Amino acid sequence: MHLRHSRSWTLALSAILFAAMIFSANIATSPALAGEAMHKVAIHVDSSDPQLQNMALNNVQNLNKYYKSKGETVQIELVAYGPGLHMLRSDTSKVKSRIATMALEMDNLQFSACGNTHAKMTKKAGKEVVLLSEATNVPSGVVRLIELQEKGYAYVRP
């Protein structure tokens, strides 16, 4: 009889320890507790149309406001390439003051500029095309969007 109780006790203890390991693993990988954004969004801009660029910036602000009101975090990355790179050019951007303000107000926002497009525009201009200080140059806008989606970012194209 003593042996049967010992096995039952061992099985029960093993089950409890297993459940505790699963629970602690879930806590450790929870985005909110691991310091990661609970929500991640990639916004794609490939148009030089200021109306579309403003719509993309409206999307950024609305997303940020919505998740903030729910007490949740969101990481947003706006990726511009092709004609959309004009959004992040210091000489042609029609939304640069808005970008500057948003970059100061939102530490969860990144602006990524396509390096391929930047190189082509620089070559065509015959001089270095200067990007806004808020922009981060990435090798390829398309590749960046793929990488973000592979990391679990939702994809939005206004």
Image (spheres, rainbow, N blue to C red):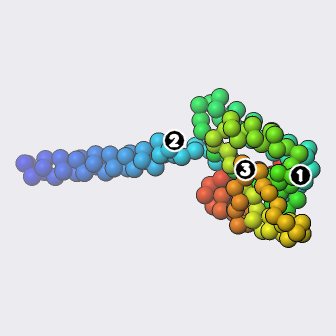
Question: Residue at image x 50%, y 44%?
Answer: 35
Give the residue type that dot 2 points to: Ala
Q: Residue at x 64, y 32 (%)?
A: 68
The location of residue 47, given as percent across then percent down, is: 88, 55
Is the residue 4 above or below the residue 127 in the image?
above
Q: Residue furthest top?
A: 69
**Which is more foreground, mark 2 or mark 1?**
1
User: Can you identify the residue that label 2 sits on?
Assistant: 32
Which residue matches tag 3?
133
Q: Secondary structure at mark 1?
A: loop
Tell me which label, 3 or 2, sits earlier in the chain: 2
Q: Are circles 3 and 1 on residues that touch, CB within 8 Å?
A: no
Q: Residue 65: image x %, image y %?
A: 70, 32
Tag 1: amino acid: Thr
Amino acid type indicated by mark 3 = Ser
Report how far apart the C-alphas of labels 3 and 2 lie in the structure: 30 Å
Q: Which SS class for mark 2?
A: loop
On residue 92, which mark appears? 1
For label 1, count other residues whose C-alpha is less than 10 Å away and answer few (under 14), some (14-19) or many (20+). some
Label 2: few (<14), some or many (≥20) within 10 Å?
Answer: some
Q: Mark 2 vs mark 1: which is more N-terminal?
A: 2
Which of the 4 image quadrants contains residue 149? bottom right
